[in-house]
Image: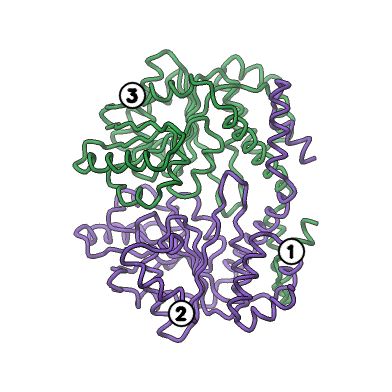
Chain colours: A green, B purple
Amino acid sequence: MWHKLLDGLQQQDRKSLARTISLIENEVLGYDDFLQKLPSGNTPIIGVTGPPGAGKSSIIDALIGNIVAHQQKVAVLCVDPSSAFSRGALLGDRIRMNVWYKHPDVYIRSLASRGSLGGLTSSILEVSSVLQVAGFDYIIIETVGVGQSEIEIVGLADITVVVLVPEAGDEIQTMKAGLMEIADIFVMNKSDRPDAAAFLKNLLALKNSYAVGKDIAVVSTVAIQEKGITQLYDEINTRLDTPQINDKKLWLLTNRLYQIIQKKKMQSFDKNLMMEKVKQSLHENNVNLYQLASEWAG
Amino acid sequence: MWHKLLDGLQQQDRKSLARTISLIENEVLGYDDFLQKLPSGNTPIIGVTGPPGAGKSSIIDALIGNIVAHQQKVAVLCVDPSSAFSRGALLGDRIRMNVWYKHPDVYIRSLASRGSLGGLTSSILEVSSVLQVAGFDYIIIETVGVGQSEIEIVGLADITVVVLVPEAGDEIQTMKAGLMEIADIFVMNKSDRPDAAAFLKNLLALKNSYAVGKDIAVVSTVAIQEKGITQLYDEINTRLDTPQINDKKLWLLTNRLYQIIQKKKMQSFDKNLMMEKVKQSLHENNVNLYQLASEWAG
C-alpha cells in the first residue's frame, strides 16, 4: 500500500495524496516507516500568520491567483480553525474558493489543530514533508496567532509572512522585537483604511530600530481587490532565490527534528489512561503530579 | 538547601520564594526531587488571556486592588512578553505597579516565555505548584493569545478570563466556538468606546448559540478607571465557590500531568547536539528527519 502511494504521490496523483495525508493524520500502521523512507523534497514552505480577521485567507486566495497565473502549483494547509478556507468559505468567498478547490494546480487541505482536549498532536510537519515530494512549487501554511503559537510556524516555514491590519496599531507597539524576530515579510492588509499611513510609519520605524541585520519586507495590500499581491509574490520569490543563510536552514531542520522527536516520545502516553491514574490518586487523596509523572515516565 | 526552602515557602518568606522559583526555572540539581516532595496546594489559578493591547495588565492591576482590599494575598505570573508587568511598566502604569511590586500581599514575577530558539520550555506549571504552597489566596497567570497558545493556559487555570475590546468585533465572529470552549468569563474592556453596545450584543448572541451547557459570565469593564472590576472579582469568586465539576478538575490534572511528562521526556535532548547531527547529515547530503529522529529517540 505505502509503496504504491509513494508512486502516486510522485506522479502527482491527487487521490494518492489525499489518502496518504489521511493515513498520516491517523497514524495508520506503517506511517512512520513510510516517512523514514520518504525522499526529502525541497518545496519551499511559506507560513502565513496573523490575528483572526486580518485577512489571511484573502491574501492567500489572491496569492494562489498569482501562482497559478505563473503556471505553478501550490498546496495550502490550513491550521487556523477560523480560516475561511477551513470553514469552507462563506458569502462572497464561496465562489472564488470553490474555483481553487477544483483547480488542477491547487490543493487545499485543512488539518485538525492541536486541540487541547484529545491530546491530538498536529500532523502539520509530516503532511508538509509529504507535500514536498508531490510536485508542488509552493506550500502555504496558514496559522492564526499574535502570541506564541506563530513561533511554531517560524520553526517550520522557510519564509514567514505576518499579516496585520492598520487597526493593529496598539498591538504592534507592544509586540516589537518578538514580531521582528518572527517576520520575513510584513503585509499591511486593508491598506485603504484611513489609519493606514500612520500604521505604516510605525511599522517602518519599528523595523528600523529592531530588525538589525535582517531585511524584512513591508508590503501594503488590499487583498479582496488583489492590490499589492504581485509585490508580495515577488518579495516571496526574491527571498526564496537568495541562497539561504546556512544557519537559518540548519536551525529550521533542527527545530523540525526536535518536534518529530517530541511527538514520538509522547506517542505512547494515553491521556485516557492518565486520567484513570489521576482519578485513582484523587480517591486516595494523594495527588502529586510530579511523583505520578516520575512513576509513569521513568 | 531544598528542605530549608520548603520551610521558608510555607512561612511565606519572599526571599525563599524568589530563590525557589529561580532554582526551578534553571532546573538546578534536586529540583525534580523537590517537586515530587512538594505538598499539593489548592490555591486557585486564574488565567487571564487575550490579544495584546486589550488591557490585560490594567485588568490585573485593578483586580489586585480588589483582592488586597479584601485582605487577601495574590501572586501574579506574567508569561506575556508584551505585558506591562513584565516590561516593568511604562508611563502612567509605572507608579501604580511600583506600589504592587512592593506590597506585602502581592508577588509579581515574569517567566521566560517558551522561546523557540533555545528550546527552553516554560516553567509555568512548576512555578505555579510552588506558589500554591506559599500562602496565596489567588494565583493569576497572564498570557497573550488569540489563537492556540491560550489553550495551554486553559489546561492549567481553574478559571480562564478572556479579555477583549469592542474593536475585536470582526475577530470574535471568526473565533466563535473556540472562544466559548476556552472562556469561563469574558471581559469586554474599554467598554466606554462607542462600539461597545454592538459588540456586547454580538458576544451575548454567540454565548447563547455556542456555549451550551456552560455558564459563561460576561463583564464590561473600563479597567483604567477600575469600572466593573468588583463585578469581575465577584464572578471569579462565585465560580471558585461552586464545587468544581469533577470532570473538569480531572481533566485539568491530567493535562498538567501530560505536560510534566512531556517536559521530562524532552529534557535529555540537547538542541545543540541535534544541530551538530543535522549539520553532519547535510554534509553527507542525506537528510531524512524521520530517520534521524528514529535513530535518536529510539
- Amino acid type at image mark 3: Gln
Q: Label 3: which residue?
A: A231
Distance, label 2 to label 1, CA atoms, is 31 Å
Q: Quadrant of residue A294?
A: bottom right
Distance, label 3 to label 1, CA atoms, is 53 Å
Discs 2 and 3 lie in a common subunit: no
Residue at the (47%, 57%) spot, across then down: B80
Check the residue under mark 2 and report the chain it is in.
Answer: B
- Amino acid type at image mark 1: Asp
Q: Label 1: which residue?
A: B32
Looking at the rendered image, the disc whose residue lies closer to the viewer, 2 or 1, is 2
Q: Label 2: which residue?
A: B103
Residue at the (69%, 81%) spot, across then down: B7
Label 3, secondary structure: give it.
Answer: helix
Residue at the (46%, 50%) spot, across then down: A147
In which quadrant will I find the N terminus of chain B? bottom right
In which quadrant will I find the C terminus of chain B? top right
Above or below for B199 versus B108: above
- Say few, some or many: other residues with alpha carbon within 10 Å of mark 2 (under 14 / 14 to 19 / 20 or more): few
